[in-house]
């Protein structure tokens, strides 16, 4: 009888199975992205649908156009401020609750706006602030959801499709607002927003699962009952055994999102995105005025339809840009043997994520600058209306490509703070956008359309060197954040050991 060696007698350890970043299937992820895209629609829709009713409101409230425009300025201010609060809360307490509360606030504020007496102009200002506080935050929370469920390899495509919702608002908002105000009166605009946002809120209550990783991990950890959707069609892979095997990450304390501006690479990305967004918003905000003076034969309905070109470019660009981002990411990944076979986001410090996301940025910036300058000179020379409309399509197409590329990179850099980083992005770009919108008409009057857009295009061209600076300093900034995170984790483990010792001694 032969004796087995120690190696033969020892049990064979089962191979380690690496947990997926998210247990949601591809179909479930796309369903979640579709849900949050529906919710993200209301941020730009609630702002853009209001524009055609401004002259009507000036008559109804017996105020000047400048005073009614103040409601637009305050709306943009709160669009920048409110995500700093709601987005950061969603990083701590969960996406689902904050999404539903924002939609509830939007619906209630629209009820108040629809019932506002025309003698109470102050109430119109007040409720427009609350309307922005509810609608604008859905975009930041939605970006946080994408950071929760997607890896770098698929994040660009998800963000591209998600952007269709927020970008659909500028396309249909002015047309829809003009029809409602013309046929049913200005109050119908707010009743429409109230009903549609309430429907969206009900859809979220029924179907949207919680995705915050400190609550559900990769989706395998059953959350408390309050986090469950009424109809749990997503996340059926959740199991208690998985919960026992891997507890949820510790919940983060509420932190000031402005601290993210202290990171050099993040600050540069926010500046680039803010400048491009402000120029884009300056172009779109002046479309009605510029086209009305250049092509006086256009009716109000025709002017509203002109917005479809820039909105259509943005919708098409959202789909196209997402696919290109994922394709370019894979190209860079395959060129690096040390990470080419990794199925998850390992070797983060070694992988040049800035290069992968920003390689096409100089080309996009060049096309954006050329489109803006060409649009300005077409208007200045009073060419056929086809010229500026085609260039507006290009402005929308390329601007969304630039903004989505930067947004995707910021989510890559800080996926656990997706809503907070998007809130900072919203704050910077809305602040710059509000400043440019207030200055665009005096600029057009002083310089003329051609030279005004030449100036704005030149400012955007200055962002090109900033892109190369981000690619250069980005890896070092990521490495420093990684070291700081390791130090914080070690301190947390030390505190846990001390608490365990105190409990054992007691």
Image (cartoon, rainbow, N blue to C red):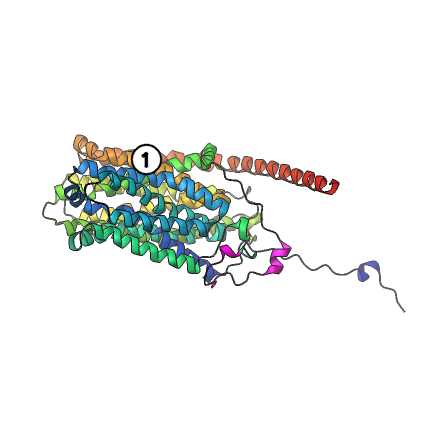
> What kind of element bears circle 1?
helix
Of 152 and 487, nearer the camera is 487
Q: Residues within 10 Å of mark 1 (few under 14, many from 20)?
A: many
- Is 310 situated left or right of 344 in this image? left
Asked whether 244 falls inside the magenta stretch, the response is yes
Regarding residue 167, the answer to whether it shows in the image is yes
x and y, in percent, of residue 459 in the image: 30, 33
Tag 1 residue: 432
Farthest-out residue, right: 1
327 horizontally vs 49: left or right: right
Q: Would you say residue 410 is visible in this rendering? A: no
Residue under the image location 29 percent in, 36 percent down? 434
**Side of 339 relative to 160 (left or right):** right
Residue 20, quarter of picture:
bottom right
- Residue 346, percent from left and from top: 57, 48
Residue 74 is inside the magenta segment: no
Q: Residue at x 83, y 58 (%)?
A: 6
Taking the spot 29% from the left edge, 38% from the top edge, the residue there is: 74
Residue 82: % across, % down: 38, 41
| Stretch in magenta | 225-246
């Amino acid at each position: 009888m032969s004796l087995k060696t120690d190696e033969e007698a020892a049990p064979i350890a089962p191979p380690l199975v690496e947990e997926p970043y998210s247990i949601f299937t591809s179909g479930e992820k796309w369903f979640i992205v579709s849900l949050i895209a529906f919710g993200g629609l209301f941020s730009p829709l609630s702002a853009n649908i209001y524009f055609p009713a401004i002259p009507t409101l000036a008559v109804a409230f017996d105020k000047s156009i400048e005073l009614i425009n103040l409601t637009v300025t305050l709306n943009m201010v709160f669009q920048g401020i409110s995500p700093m609060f709601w987005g950061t809360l969603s990083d701590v307490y969960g996406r689902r609750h904050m999404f539903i509360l924002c939609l509830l606030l939007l619906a209630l504020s629209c009820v108040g706006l629809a019932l506002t007496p025309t003698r109470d102009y102050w109430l119109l200002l007040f409720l427009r602030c609350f309307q922005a506080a509810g609608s604008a935050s859905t975009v930041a929370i939605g970006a946080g959801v994408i950071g929760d469920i997607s890896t770098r390899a698929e994040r660009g495509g998800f963000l591209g499709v998600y952007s269709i919702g927020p970008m659909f608002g500028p396309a249909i908002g002015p047309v829809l607002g003009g029809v409602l105000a013309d046929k049913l009166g200005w109050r119908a605009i707010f009743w429409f927003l109230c009903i549609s946002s309430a429907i969206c809120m009900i859809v979220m209550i029924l179907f949207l699962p919680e995705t915050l990783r400190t609550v559900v991990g990769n989706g395998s950890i059953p959350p408390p009952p309050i986090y469950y959707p009424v109809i749990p069609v997503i996340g059926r892979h959740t199991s208690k055994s998985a919960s026992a095997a891997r507890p949820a990450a510790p919940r983060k304390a509420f932190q000031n999102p402005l601290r993210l501006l202290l990171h050099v690479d993040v600050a540069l990305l926010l500046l680039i995105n803010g400048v491009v967004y402000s120029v884009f918003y300056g172009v779109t905000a002046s479309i009605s005025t510029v086209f009305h003076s250049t092509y006086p034969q256009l009716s109000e309905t025709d002017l509203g339809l002109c917005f479809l070109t820039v909105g259509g470019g943005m919708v098409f660009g959202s789909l196209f840009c997402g696919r290109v981002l994922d394709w370019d990411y894979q190209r860079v990944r395959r060129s690096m043997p040390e990470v080419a076979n990794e199925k998850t986001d390992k070797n983060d410090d070694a992988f040049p994520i800035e290069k992968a996301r920003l390689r096409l940025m100089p080309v996009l910036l060049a096309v954006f600058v050329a489109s803006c300058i060409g649009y300005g000179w077409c208007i200045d020379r009073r060419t056929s209306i086809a010229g500026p409309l085609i260039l507006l399509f290009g402005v929308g197409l390329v601007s969304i490509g630039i903004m989505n590329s930067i947004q995707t990179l910021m989510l890559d850099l800080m996926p656990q703070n997706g809503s907070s980083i998007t809130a900072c992005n919203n704050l910077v770009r809305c602040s710059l956008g509000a400043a440019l919108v207030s200055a665009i008409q005096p600029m057009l009057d002083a310089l003329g359309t051609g030279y005004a857009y030449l100036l704005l295009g030149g400012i955007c061209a200055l962002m090109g060197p900033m892109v190369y600076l981000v690619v250069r300093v980005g890896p070092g900034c990521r490495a420093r954040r990684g070291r700081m995170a390791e130090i914080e984790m070690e301190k947390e483990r030390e505190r846990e050991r001390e608490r365990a010792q105190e409990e054992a001694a007691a």
